[in-house]
Amino acid sequence: MKDTVILADGLSILSQCRRLTGDVWQAHYGAAAIAGYFFIKENHGSEIIEEAVAAENRRMIDKYLQQGTMTGESMDVKSAESTILAALDDTIDGLHWVGHNVIYAAISLAALHELEGGLQHEVTDIAELISSFAKTIPGRSWIGYSAAEVKRLTLEKVDGIPEITGADQLSAFILNELAAYSVIYRAEAHHDLIGHMLTFSHALNILYDLGHRAYFHRGLPGLLKIVKVLRASRELDAAQPIRIVSPVDRLPLAEAARSVWLPNQPEYWAVIDGASIDWEFGHLFKFPFSFYHHWNRTSEAPEKALENFRYIVHPA
């Protein structure tokens, strides 16, 4: 994959987010652009897939990238890394918006390493974006918990979560968690949290692989809170009242649609119209990038994880 302009554009979208919108969410599209680049690079798909993903990625970038601010003094990758990690240091020990502080930081670092540096003003803006997650809530939509309860949640030995010491072990653990679901619901509290279990854990693995092992370990408790909450909703009892704390979800819960095709198949991209679904807020690229990262580094990945992934991606 030679079109590294996509990486530079992704970093630009990340850096422009707070100035243009006043919040942290349009940065999704910058992270997604970078994810699309690495999805192609790391999965060695057919030329048809590469061209389709790149074309969708470019359409998304063209919609969300503000032109005219992509020049300035350069920063070497070591300095850029130090700046972003210093910002992440303020929030890495807690769960903030299902891990987007870590996701934005890690994927930015991946792009900066691939480019061997970046623009100083963009790195500074991305660091400010990451710092802005301080004191934010764990997330907004949960089954069985309120955001305040998630924030206070502790991990106990009785939870049966093993000690995780490295990235390979984390990937295997996450795929086994994904495989354990008998039903995946469309509700944001379920669908997006499962998806962000994939992306948050992947972000920690990026930090691990870049040599930032302390950040990997400091970020694990936040990720494992999501795992614990999701386990509570994995086997819902229809005879018992279901508690949903969410501004968007309502009962009865509806099952997610199953995708016939997977993102590593050309048929998937042949029927996807990214613009009509707003590229799933960028998750059209982010969820496949993270799932196949875990899948590729796990020697005995459970097939049920692959089947359940069909309910996480946009149906095609």
Image (cartoon, rainbow, N blue to C red):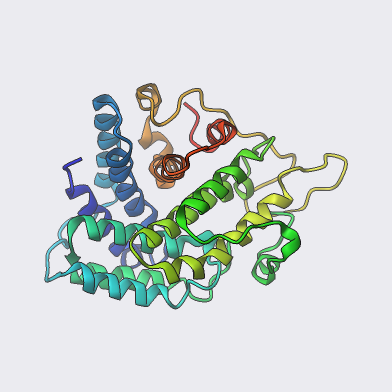
Residue found 44% across the figure and 63% down from its top: 102
Check the image and report above or below for 258 versus 126: above
Residue found 61% across the figure and 46% down from its top: 177
Residue found 55% across the figure and 71% down from its top: 94
Q: Quadrant of the N terminus?
A: top left
Residue found 47% across the figure and 51% down from its top: 168
Q: Is residue 288 visible?
A: yes
How far from the left and from the top, in percent, is residue 157? 72, 64
Q: Report the front residue among 251 and 125.
A: 125
Q: Report the front residue among 106 and 147.
A: 106
How far from the left and from the top, in percent, is residue 275? 36, 36
Find residue 258 and report its image quarter.
top right
How far from the left and from the top, in percent, is residue 239? 88, 41
Find residue 58 and report its image quarter.
top left
How far from the left and from the top, in percent, is residue 179? 61, 38
Q: Report the front residue among 304 and 107.
A: 304
Number of numbered callouts drawn: 0
Check the image and report above or below for 232 versus 55: below
Residue at the far right in the pictured view: 239
Q: Is residue 196 visible?
A: no
